[in-house]
Image (cartoon, rainbow, N blue to C red):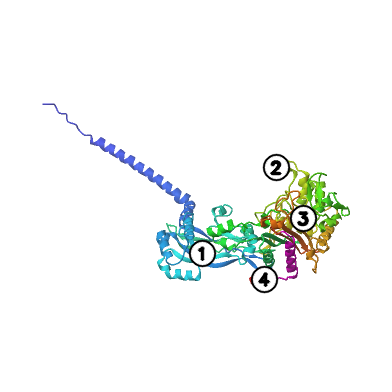
């Protein structure tokens, strides 16, 4: 039998161990409570302001309300861009439930196109405030509004909202000048204050609407609202009403604009009228135009494709971007350049044959009059538009003096102050040709530029601005659309002055050139003699721009050519010649005879100077405010 050992427990030692463990645990708990209390003190006291703000941000939200957009008026108070109330069908997705079921219910009430549903689905993917409504169908008719109102009780999340939308009462004739607003895209938001445009639907896309966007938009209203945990607005705490956008008053004359558009008939082209005393644009027409109202609430794919694919290019702004050979309208400026640099005089005679040659056996540059003009001087070269005179003058000058002088009138530059998307055209030079073609400038290149052909390309706004400067005897105003913004003259960037003076060595040359241009109309051989018989004097110059180059001995036969190959018809003029109130440039694309733009210009002069418009234009007075 083994020996057993009896083990005795040390109760006192176990008690001391337990007590130590309790003390350590208590100390640990006390330390942790202390840390917790210190942390709570830090958060509740030291960081009170920070976390109070964060709590409020979760509970309180700032909501912006877009302001009413400023209106656009013509010089006589006629509204060219208005705001009109409409009723739109909107949906709050969080309340509407299943989209397919909603689509099925609504299809039994009113017609909603597949494109409208597609737009709605696209907007669902974009960022928006919780419980913010999305427009499904805009501009409901009275019948649609009535149908939806009857069934609203069973259409969860669907409502009819009253909204202000942009409206252009005079349509396509003003589209390229006034421009239009359209739905805001993510690209648009890159150039504006996102917070200010949070609830806005539209933004200026083109024309005056785009350039003066900041002015027309105004200042949004701000509401401080209380929201629940899901972001739904429960109550409004504080509200600051929006400030409406400022109105923009243009130099544009609405009746003159519409009249010029109509006078172009079925031709493509452009007409620009400027007040030589201010640089204000009285009319800026590009035809064909389009209905800007199509773009306001989102143009349909069908309508956009139709405009985009139209061979007449209605979306293309010919007035600002159209590149044309200035043709013989450049001759008054060429003549002044020759006088300025001593390459010609008023008294020097030149025998104008039916052609000009740089070399005796070289190419013959033909005059429009095959038999020639005989002995002429500078004034007669303007009156009869003698090509050979300007061939030889440009040959003598070379391109450098031509480029230097014509640039003073804005050729080769963006010449309008308050519209975007302007082309600078092309005023060629030695450096340009070498960079573009890796070739030197040849004498033949100068010869072509001498009559506004060859490499030279000008836009209607450039030619109109240069004509205005000629009418003002050297006062070169940069054209502009806006006369005032809420009764204040608009401000432009520094370095972009509205006026500069073109000074000639002999200032009398301005008057002598105006006299020559008056004789273009009054002389029996003047190229615009068809305009004779007015109570005021017109100074003008015709032009015929070639669309394609003729071979040396090739005859121009309009009857055998496709319409798109016909010459462009151009005219510049101002009236009254001695104290001009209006300067006009007009071009009929493929118009052939310069009589068309000349007649149009005279009609505009009569209408503007005498306030003598056809009675059919009286409806414009109804749009005045």
What x and y, as percent, mark residue 509?
Answer: 84, 56
Q: Quadrant of residue 506?
A: bottom right
What x and y, as percent, mark residue 209?
Answer: 62, 60
Q: Tag count in the figure?
A: 4
Horizontal side of residue 259 vs 363, given as left or right: left
Question: Which of pointers 4 and 2 lies earlier in the amino acid sequence?
Answer: 2
Report the span colored magenta. Answer: 592-621
Whether tag 2 and tag 3 are in contact, CB under 8 A, the answer is no
What x and y, as percent, mark residue 213?
Answer: 61, 58
Horizontal side of residue 580 vs 590, given as left or right: right
Label 4 – label 3 distance at C-alpha: 33 Å
Mark 2: secondary structure: helix
For the C terminus, the quadrant is bottom right
For the N terminus, the quadrant is top left
Q: Is residue 625 visible?
A: no
Up-down relation of residue 183 to residue 456 (above or below): below
Query: Which residue is label 2 attached to?
Result: 437
Up-down relation of residue 338 to residue 613 (above or below): above
Whether tag 2 and tag 1 are in contact, CB under 8 A, the answer is no
Query: Which residue is label 3 attached to?
Result: 328
Mark 3: secondary structure: helix
From the image, state whether disc 2 or disc 1 is nearer to you. 2
Label 2 – label 3 distance at C-alpha: 26 Å
Measuring 31% from the left and 41% from the top, which residue is drawn there?
22
Up-down relation of residue 535 to residue 32 (above or below): below
Label 2 – label 1 distance at C-alpha: 53 Å
């Amino acid at each position: 039998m083994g020996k057993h050992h009896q083990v005795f427990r040390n109760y006192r030692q176990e008690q001391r161990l337990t007590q130590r463990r309790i003390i350590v645990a208590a100390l640990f708990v006390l330390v942790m409570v202390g840390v917790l209390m210190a942390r709570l003190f830090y958060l509740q006291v030291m960081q009170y302001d920070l976390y109070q703000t964060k709590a409020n941000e979760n509970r309180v939200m700032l909501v912006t309300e877009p302001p009413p957009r400023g209106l656009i008026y013509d010089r006589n108070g006629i509204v060219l861009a208005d705001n009109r109330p409409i009723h739109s069908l909107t949906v709050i997705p969080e309340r509407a439930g299943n989209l397919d079921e909603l689509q099925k219910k609504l299809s039994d009430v009113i017609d909603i196109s597949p494109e409208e549903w597609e737009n709605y689905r696209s907007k669902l993917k974009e960022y928006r405030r919780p419980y913010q409504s999305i427009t499904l169908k805009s501009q409901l008719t009275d019948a649609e509004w009535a149908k939806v109102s009857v069934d609203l009780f069973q259409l969860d999340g669907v409502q009819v909202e009253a909204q202000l939308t942009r409206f252009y009462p005079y349509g396509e004739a003003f589209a390229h000048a006034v421009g239009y607003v359209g739905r805001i895209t993510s690209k648009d938001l890159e150039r504006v204050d996102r917070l200010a445009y949070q609830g806005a639907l539209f933004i200026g896309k083109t024309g005056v609407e785009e350039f003066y966007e900041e002015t027309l938009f105004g200042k949004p209203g701000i509401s401080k609202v209380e929201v629940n945990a899901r972001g739904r607005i429960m109550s409004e705490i504080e509200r600051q009403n929006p400030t409406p956008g400022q109105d923009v008053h243009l130099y544009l004359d609405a009746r003159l604009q519409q009249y010029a558009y109509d006078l172009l008939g079925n031709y493509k082209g452009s007409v620009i009228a400027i007040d030589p005393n201010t640089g204000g644009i009285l009319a800026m027409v590009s035809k064909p135009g389009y209905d800007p109202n199509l773009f306001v609430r989102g143009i349909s794919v069908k309508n956009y494709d139709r405009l985009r694919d139209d061979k007449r290019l209605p979306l293309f702004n010919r007035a600002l971007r159209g590149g044309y050979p200035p043709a013989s309208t450049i001759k008054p400026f060429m003549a002044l350049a020759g006088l300025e640099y001593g390459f010609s005089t008023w008294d020097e005679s030149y025998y104008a044959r039916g052609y000009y040659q740089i070399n005796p056996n070289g190419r013959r540059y033909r005059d429009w009059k095959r038999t020639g003009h005989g002995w002429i001087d500078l004034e007669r070269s303007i009156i009869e538009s003698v090509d050979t005179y300007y061939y030889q003058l440009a040959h003598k000058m070379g391109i450098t003096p031509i480029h230097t002088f014509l640039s003073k009138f804005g050729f080769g530059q963006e010449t309008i102050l308050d519209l975007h998307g302007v082309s600078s055209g092309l005023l060629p030079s030695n450096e340009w040709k070498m960079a573009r073609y890796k070739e030197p400038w040849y004498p033949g290149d100068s010869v072509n530029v001498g009559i506004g052909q060859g490499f030279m390309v000008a836009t209607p706004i450039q030619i109109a601005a240069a004509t205005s400067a000629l009418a003002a005897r050297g006062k070169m105003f940069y054209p502009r659309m806006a006369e005032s913004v809420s009764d204040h003259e608009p401000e432009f960037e520094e370095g972009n002055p509205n006026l500069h003076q073109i000074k000639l060595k002999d200032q009398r040359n301005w008057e002598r050139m105006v006299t020559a241009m008056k004789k273009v109309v009054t002389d029996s051989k003047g190229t615009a003699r068809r305009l004779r018989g007015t109570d005021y004097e017109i100074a003008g110059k015709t032009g015929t721009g070639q669309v394609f180059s003729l071979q040396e001995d090739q005859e121009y036969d309009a009857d055998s050519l496709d319409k798109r190959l016909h010459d462009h018809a151009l005219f510049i003029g101002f009236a009254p010649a001695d104290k001009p109130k209006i300067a006009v440039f007009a071009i009929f694309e493929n118009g052939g005879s310069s009589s068309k733009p000349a007649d149009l210009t005279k009609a505009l002069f009569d209408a503007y100077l005498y306030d003598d418009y056809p009675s059919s234009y009286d409806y414009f007075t109804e749009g005045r405010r």
